[in-house]
Amino acid sequence: MFEWIQVGQWIIYALVLFYVDLNYLLFIISSFFPEKAGYKKIDKYPKVSVIIPTRNEAHVIEETLKRLRKSDYPKSKLEIIVVDANSYDGTAKIAKKYADKVIIEKHPKGKPHALNLGIRKASGELIYFLDADNWVNENTIKKLVSSMETNAIVGFTTIRNQRKLIEKVSILENNLHNVIMIGLFRLFKIEIVPGCNFLISKKILKRVGYYKDTLTEDINLSLRLYKIGERVNLINAPCSIVVPKSLKSYWKQQKRWRRGGIDEIRKMTKTVSATDLLIKMPFITLAAITGTVGLIMLIIGIIFSDFIFLTGFIFGILILIAAKIKYNKDGLIYLPVVYIYYTIIEIVSLVKVLFEEITNKKVVWQKTPK
């Protein structure tokens, strides 16, 4: 009996080593792979429709649209569509000065519905998604279009507001996300599409049924694209975003992301293959909760003096350091404080979401205030 217990322990260790240590190690290595730079010239540019959902965005929408108009993408091939959720601060009035189409929702039904309205009104064969506060570089759209090897492509995001502690936590999370996405892309050709800086063929969107009314419409779309065999390319085409400036806003955002992520993964486990479920899905899940997994493994490693569990924590720290060095070296000295703060929020929000799952508490999509 004792021998069988030992065998069981080694099996657990092997799983830990594969699902956590190897996971982290590959993400660390992949984060330093060279990224595709520049773009090739193409003879005939396809028409691109940019879709921006808005809700009381008068303070940010003008600069976003001005930067889009300065894009070096052929002007005759660029269509800007703003879908406004009946704003009362003059957002639509500002948008009409720059956008080709402004759609007013008299009775807003959430972001997924707004995106679908924009898609259906779009005349472009390619659809590019942005949020109201997203700033693109002059060459971002041309870089994405000319680098498309599949029917969809994603560029990286950077964060503009970087002063407060909670903003630094968001920067770390964003950098970590970039490293993880490179890792998933290199390993499995998997990319979780974001809500912005994302370009996709309109015919593919139509094939998968556009956006669904879920808490995390981007994750939902990612899994449906993966299910039909569509792969999303990933390149370094930058777009800057604004993250929540208060703990309350950040907390709401994290809860929605985790709740939505759990819902989508639960749906996916009912339809994916055994290979995806046992190999690829754990990579996605564990990578998404780096801080929590790392801290749990540290505690177990200390209690049981177990080196294998300690390596999980070590690799978790290394991937955070790698993410920080690669994408944002500034403030590296604050990493321990930021990591602790990030991990606490991550653990508490995850526990809160799991409690809501158990109690079947209904959660609806809400815009994250910034």
Image: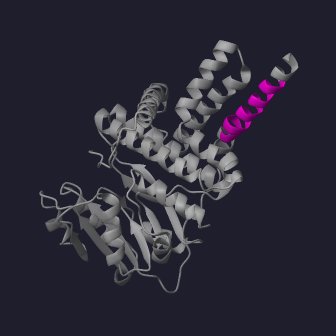
Answer yes or no: is residue 95 visible. Answer: yes
Please, is residue 26 above or below residue 350 in the view? below
Res 233 seen here: no
Q: Quadrant of the N terminus?
A: top right
Q: Position of residue 275 (x, y in %)?
A: 71, 52
Across and down, in percent, residue 18 comes to 73, 38
- Judging depth in this view, the residue of 135 and 119 nearest the camera is 119
Seen at 50% across and 50% down, the residue is 264
The residues colored magenta run 7-23
Instruction: Name the quadrant of the C terminus.
Output: top left
The percent coordinates of residue 68 (x first, y second) are 32, 68
Q: Is residue 182 above or below residue 78?
A: above
Rendered image quadrant of residue 92: bottom left
Which picture quadrant has residue 29?
A: top right
Which residue is drawn at the image coordinates 29% and 72% (left, top)? 81
Does 125 sit left or right of 317 as displayed? left
Kindly identify the residue that appears in the image at 42 percent across and 52 percent down: 216
Front-most of residues 9 and 69: 9
Q: Residue furthest bottom?
A: 44
Q: Tell me which residue sits at (48%, 54%) in the image.
A: 219
Which colour style is shown?
A: one colour
Residue 13 in magenta?
yes
Q: Is residue 169 left or right of residue 183?
A: left
Decide: is 274 above or below 167.
below
Q: Main secondary structure of the magenta part?
A: helix
Residue 304 position in % (x across, y down)? 69, 14
**Is residue 29 highlighted in magenta?**
no
